[in-house]
Image (cartoon, rainbow, N blue to C red):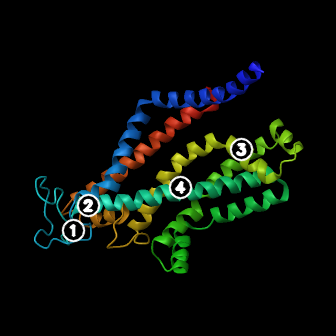
Amino acid sequence: MPSDITLHEAAPARSASTLQLQFRRFRKNWLAMVSVWLLAAVVLACFLGPYAFPFTGEDADFDNISAGINLFSAHPFGTDDFGRDLLVRVLEGGRVSLTIGFLGALVAGVIGVLYGAVAGFVGGRADGLMMRLVEILYGFPYVILVILLSLLFGGGNIALFAAIVFTLWLTPAVIVRAQAQSLARREFVEAARAGGMTNRQIIIEHIVPNCISVVIVYGSLLVPEVILSESFLSFLGIGIKEPQASWGNLIQTGTNAMDTDLRLLLLPGILLATVLFTLNFIADGLRDAFDPNDR
């Protein structure tokens, strides 16, 4: 009996040690760790920073229209052409862009993982039909799809979010499908099937958890892709619209005024570039930590 207890307690310790080893390897990547702290600082500033000011990004100060940088004034980074505080608008725009980025990546990742796991595990004609649908959607022009969804949903944030999710779940579906195809022929899957588990139970309890390393790595790459897509569409005037701020429409406004007031472009551009670079460095660190060829 004591030996049984010892064996029972040793199994979780072994899996925990594997996870600890992976995160220990991640922490040894100094560039990824610096990126984690820098990204956390930007996220906290965007979500909490606007509350430190007595006004919002839509409040106009007509006595300080187009005010320049003065770190000791009520508007430390100045105001825009409408008297709105530039720093507050950039932080509020970052809140919108980051929310769409993380939520969009989460929803697109969940859809793609489940779709790919089902297609790869079931196989046969169902797999062929499901992958043909993915190929058709891959060939559909992205901007035209956004315009159609904007007409369908009446424009606004819902149309933007739906368009981003509708296109970005395709790649994780293809990646997870390849993983599921190889896992479907493994011994533990055959044992689960012989034990009476249904296909749904096998997919949820065995296929998806064994794809988790690929999902984590690709998910960290999906977030900057969603943020960049939102910024690109808002820059074109299709996404977030005035007076609501996002990094995309702020950069578009700054581009129009870059000959006369470069700070309108630099502040949102620097924050957007910082977030994109940090997310990519974090993704590289996670890939190295979860790389099965390096274990």
Please give the label number shown on residue 105: 4
Q: Earlier in the sequence, mark 1 or mark 3?
A: 1
Asked if the residue at tag 3 contacts the one at tag 1, i.e. Cβ–Cβ closer than 8 Å, the answer is no
Mark in front: 3 vs 2? 2
Horizontal and vertical percent position of residue 282: 47, 40
Residue at 55%, 48% (x, y): give it: 219
Q: Earlier in the sequence, mark 4 or mark 1?
A: 1
Please give the label number shown on residue 201: none
Q: Secondary structure at mark 2?
A: helix
Q: Secondary structure at mark 1?
A: loop
Q: Secondary structure at mark 3?
A: helix
Measured Cα–Cα span from mark 2 to mark 4: 25 Å
Q: Earlier in the sequence, mark 3 or mark 2?
A: 2
Horizontal and vertical percent position of residue 218: 57, 46
Asked if the residue at tag 1 contacts the one at tag 2, i.e. Cβ–Cβ closer than 8 Å, the answer is yes
Q: Quadrant of residue 189?
A: top right
Q: Disc 2 residue type? A: Val
User: In the image, 61: left or right of 159?
Assistant: left
Which residue is label 1 attached to? Answer: 84
Please give the label number shown on residue 88: 2
Which residue is label 3 attached to? Answer: 179
